[in-house]
Amino acid sequence: MFETVFNSVVRFMAEYNQFFTDGLKYLGAGVAVIAGIGPGIGQGYAAGKAAEAVGRQPEARGTIISTTLVTAALAETTGLYGLLVAIFLLFVV
């Protein structure tokens, strides 16, 4: 069973190689862009917790906000790496 399916895929790849590789390239780029969802959720959660912390201890506002900004920048790099991989897949490969 597996060999039949594998042989069909190999035959399909041989006939439509350019379309097959382009499709996989676009599929990979789409999956890479999905990596931006995690940083968005994480940044929202961190901002909410920072607002809670400032509400509890207003005197530590400067430290909390600076730490939150650094962690938000760190989380954003993950989304940017996903976007960079998607751009490489679309235009370089």
Image (cartoon, rainbow, N blue to C red):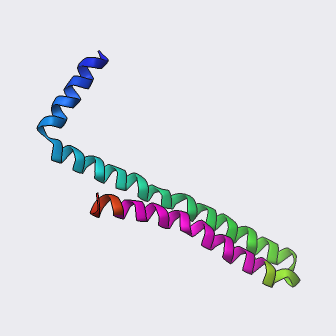
Q: Which of 88/38 is in front?
A: 88
Question: Quarter-wise, where is residue 32 in the image?
Answer: bottom left
Residue at image position (63%, 67%) is 44
- From the top left corner, tell me how far across and down residue 73 is, in percent: 61, 73
Residue 11 as seen in the image, left or right of residue 36? left
Residue at image position (62%, 69%) is 74
- From the top left corner, tell me how far across and down residue 17 is, in percent: 17, 42
Q: Which of 56/83 is in front?
A: 83
Q: Is residue 65 magenta?
A: yes
Assign the N terminus to one quadrant of the image. top left
Q: Is residue 68 magenta?
A: yes
- From the top left corner, tell me how far across and down residue 25 is, in percent: 29, 51
- From the top left corner, tell me how far across and down residue 81 is, in percent: 48, 63
Assign the C terminus to one quadrant of the image. bottom left
Give the magenta part as a residue range. Answer: 64-87
Residue 81 as seen in the image, left or right of residue 41? left
Residue at image position (51%, 59%) is 37
As drawn, 61 above or below 30: below
Residue 52 as seen in the image, left or right of residue 18? right
Residue 52 as seen in the image, left or right of residue 77? right
Question: Quarter-wise, where is residue 68 in the image?
Answer: bottom right
